[in-house]
Structures are given as C-alpha cells and as structure tokens.
Amino acid sequence: MTSDEPASQDRAPQSEAPQSQAPQAPSAYRPAPDSPFRAERTARDEAPQFVLPLVARIERAAPPARTDALQTAARAVLTILSDARSQGEGEWARAMRDWQDARIRKVVRRARGAEWRRAEALPGITVTGKSAEVRVYPPVPLDGWPKDLARLQVSGTDLDDPEPPLDPDGTAPVLWLSPDVEMSAGKAMAQAGHGAQLAWWDLTDAERAAWRDAGFPLAVRTAEPGRWRELVASGLPVVRDAGYTEIAPGSCTVVADHPALRAR
C-alpha cells in the first residue's frame, strides 16, 4: 500500500512520476481562521517533518473490503486527533503538535499474522470497521520509524469491494473521492484520512464533540464526474495531493462533505 500527504490544501507531496490528467476545477475552499491549514508556503514547510503511521490488518485469507478499509482509516485519524493523549499535556500531544505544525503526512502499511501482533503491541489505537482493522500511532520523524513498523510493506496489496457500496444517506459526513484519479487502496486510505482531518480542523469545538460522541460516522464514496466538479468548487475542504507517489502533483483527490460545513 502506498500513502502520502496532501498538497497545497492539506500539506502536500511532490510527485515521483507525474502523470497527465484532466484539468481540475478551481477550488473555492477557504479554511477556518483558526485551522492549521494554509495553502501558501509557510514556516511549516521548513519545520522538521513527521508522519502519522497507519497499519491495516490484511490477512491473506480474509482481506477487508476496500470501502470499509478507507472508512476505517479515516475514522482512525479522527480517533487519534480527538484522543485525550493527543490533547494538552497528554503523552502524544507534543508529537501531534509537531506533526500538525508541518505537512500532515500519512503512511499506510499492511500487516498480517505475527506482523500484526507485533504492530498491535506498540502504543497506538486500533479502530475496527465491518471487516477492516486499522491501527494508528502517534506521529514519528520521517526517519524515525519504530523497527516493527519500518519493516512492514507499503505496497503490493490492493483491495476490492465484494459488492458495490450503498449510496450514502446524506445525514453523515461523506468523503468524496475523485472519479478522475486512480489510487491504490493504501493511497486512498491516506487521502481519506487527509479529508477527514481537514473537516475536523474546520469544525467548531461543539461540532467536533458531536461527531466524536456519535462514533465518527462517515462514508467514503467515489463521486460521479458532474457531481465531482460541483463538489470541488463548493467551498468544502478539498485535498490536493502534491504527488510524492502514484498521482500527479496538484490532483484533487478528496472533498470532505460534512453537513455542518455544508450548511455554512
């Protein structure tokens, strides 16, 4: 599986192998005044860079459904953002601040069997979906991965949905994926996490608490082409990838459609 961080509109990666793609509609998204996100280059680009590790459990005989894995990864990001250990003087707070003061890189790796058991023994949080398990860890320096995570594979596994996912009901947040950009499961999991984080940053404290208390309900779906163009220009949070892996720099990958933000 592969990962990345978002670009201009969510901190970003620069492509290893840029690919051509259809032009993207300009985004009308403007972050909340107190959001850490800024589209322009800032001191965050010069700060020491950290990464948020996520590990997906992918057993050979029973891999999770792709959509469930994406949704579980997004909820895992929200779970660690809202955890008491990430707040104030909590044990993870300094690492979380350092990470969010730079580009919000995320890397998704896969584990099975004994690898998963070793990964579960490290400090972090395991979030479960219907078929997926994703463990998220406090951020680490780019070159400071724990040994048992560093040895895990990033690529080589993709996931499928046994049945097409149902249409979202519209009452819960939806992370809309671009219909124009093909991504591996790991890349899409990281991008869904970026979208969830941008929405989290733009919510008020009361809205965050309500989402957390409800268990972070959300859906991840691929938008129809016409709907996608409307979403990108709607003013909702947009993830733009800087292209470190898989896709062209500047690609719009996710729009975070949270009802509280849609109503503004």
Image (cartoon, helix red, strand yellow):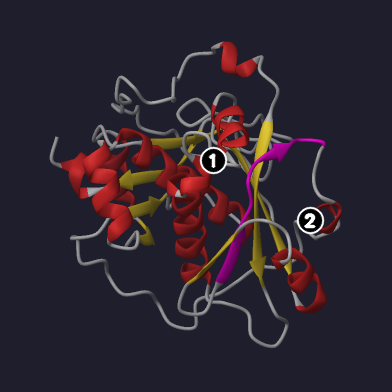
Secondary structure of the residue carrying numbered label 1: loop
Q: Is residue 5 above or below residue 110?
A: above
- What residue sits right under mark 1 in the picture? 90
Say how many tags the image has.
Answer: 2
Q: Is residue 44 above or below residue 176?
A: above
- What residue sits right under mark 2 in the picture? 149
User: Is residue 134 on the magenta stretch?
Assistant: yes
The 10 Å Cα crowd at callout 2, few under 14, some 14 to 19, many 20 or more, is: many
Q: Amino acid at mark 1?
A: Gly
Front-lying residue, 54 or 139: 139
Identify the residue at the far left of this view: 263
Q: How far apart are labels 1 and 2 at the CA level?
A: 23 Å
Residue 145 place in picture, x, y as percent: 80, 45
N-terminal-most mark, 1 or 2: 1
- The residue under the point 61% across, 62% down is 135
Identify the residue at the far front of this view: 89
**Magenta highlight range:** 133-143
Residue 16 place in picture, x, y as percent: 74, 35
| Residue 30: mark | none
- The residue under the point 63% across, 42% down is 4
User: Is residue 102 on the magenta stretch?
Assistant: no
Which quarter of the rendering shows the C terminus? top left
Of circles 1 and 2, the one toward us is 1
* 260 with respect to 97 (left or right): left
